[in-house]
Amino acid sequence: MSDAQKVDYEFLLRSNLERVFSERDASKRAAAVAELFVAEPVMYEPDNVVTGRTAISDVAGKLLEQFGPSFSFAASAPAVGHHGMGSLRWQAGPKDGPVTVTGTDIAEVENGKISRLWVLLDPPTT
């Protein structure tokens, strides 16, 4: 069985969104990062490149702090992927409020874990 057939892209990318980027408890978030990412992952944001599990966890925590206690991320479509590359469309905003940002996570997967993650933000709608 090839690596492409064994990877559960839905689990991996949705878990990253829910257990890393929507998790406010730093210890739970760090445990999720350790489970989902390789030892030395790289995350590419529009204005930054982040290296390492701790740095990725810190970025997620700072985002949640910045946008307030009810801000969270949610998948807007099922994840898709093959041959070590997966993607997940998402949206974010206050739990009871309007969606304030949408985007796509693109992940390179090695041995069932995220090795590189690109965070692509959609242009704002006006």
Image (tube, grey):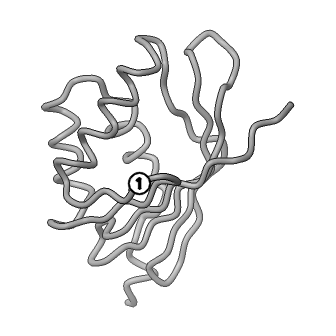
Q: Is residue 37 above or below residue 90?
A: below
- Provide the secondary structure element on which disc 1 rests: strand
Q: How many marks?
A: 1
Q: Nearer the viewer, residue 115 or 120?
A: 120
Residue wearing tag 1: 48
Q: Nearer the viewer, residue 89 or 82?
A: 89
Which residue corresponds to the image point at 58% horizontal and 23% vertical from the top-left? 93
Residue 119, position as x, y percentages in the image = 51, 54
Which residue corresponds to the image point at 49% horizontal and 75% vertical from the top-left? 85
Task: Give the side of residue 68 with respect to residue 37, left or right.
Answer: right
Q: Quadrant of residue 90?
A: top right
- Badge 1 crowding class, 10 Å Cα cut-off, few under 14, some 14 to 19, many 20 or more, is few
Q: Is residue 35 above or below residue 3?
A: above
Which residue corresponds to the image point at 70% horizontal and 47% vertical from the top-left? 122
Q: Quarter of the image for the C terminus: give it.
A: top right
Amino acid at dot 1 = Asn
Q: Quadrant of residue 4?
A: bottom left
Residue most extreme to the bottom: 1
Residue 69, position as x, y percentages in the image = 41, 11
